[in-house]
Image (tube, grey):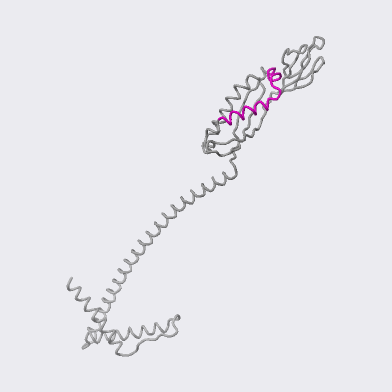
Amino acid sequence: MGNVNCVFCGCIEQASIGVVEKWGRFDRLAEPGLNFWNPLAGECLSGTLSTRINSLDVKIETKTKDNVFVQLLCSIQYRVIRQNADDAFYELQNPTEQIQAYVFDVVRAHVPKMNLDELFEQKDEVAKAVLEELEKVMGAYGYNIEHILMVDIIPDASVRRAMNEINAAQRMQLASVYKGEADKILQVKKAEAEAEAKYLGGVGVARQRQAITDGLRENILNFSHKVEGASAKEVMDLIMITQYFDTIKDLGNSSKNTTVFIPHGPGHVRDIGDQIRNGLMEAASAQVTE
């Protein structure tokens, strides 16, 4: 709005509209560009209004249905209706205060009906309710509400901390469940691996013993055929003595052992030979039984 302009012509800026009065009463609207009026006939430019979109940020503090105090930041975008600019010029002294008052009234009527979670989920519904109310009221005063944006919902700091703690606890609980399932799978796989390893180890030991038995039998038979007059017992004793000294040699060559105490004597060799011979006989009898 401007002061009364008692001249014969004037320019109205783009995105603006002028209000021309005649003898103090509204006469017509002046479009952007060069306009003429006759001060001698009582005509004058009373003022101008911008038709650009204006933005008004309103911060409202209220509480939800579950007694949580929140601050809502609402952004209202409005503009003057060009055809009804005279109503906007004359009816409202301060349109921003009028818009703010209606926003406070609508928000504080709707938000106390919602829980905090519902408010976050349905903030567009609150914005829609504010838009419908403002369009109905402000349209009569020559203003059009373009958009209403519920920019932010800010609960009390203590409530935010509590919500974060609840969220963290839920995530920790879910992580514990996943960790327990992972440990369970790991234990099962470990048990299965140990069982398979023991089974394969037993198969390996059995095959090893069978191979030793077959090798000794073959050596005894070959030696008995090639050396006339040699009995199986004598061949076994000879093989055992040879293996005995080979074992002592391997122990002495090992770099990890510095001192090894072993019983050494022909009697010990004979005892080992008797044990192996008994094992061979038991293996042979088992094969005959099968």
212, 141: nearer the viewer = 141
Task: Check residue 273 for magenta coloring.
Answer: no
Does residue 289 appear to the left or right of 67 in the view shown? left
Residue drawn where x is 46% and y is 51% of the image: 173
Q: Is residue 208 above or below residue 100?
A: below
Q: Which residues are magenta?
A: 85-109
Q: Residue 108: image x %, image y %?
A: 58, 31
Residue drawn where x is 27% and y is 79% of the image: 216
- Quarter of the rendering occupied by the C terminus: bottom left
Does residue 60 appear to the left or right of 41 in the view shown? left
- Quarter of the rendering occupied by the N terminus: top right
135, 77: nearer the viewer = 135
In the figure, residue 222 lies in which quadrant?
A: bottom left
Q: Residue 128: image x %, image y %?
A: 56, 28
Q: Residue 220: image x %, image y %?
A: 25, 82
Does residue 131 appear to the left or right of 169 in the view shown? right
Q: Residue furthest left?
A: 289
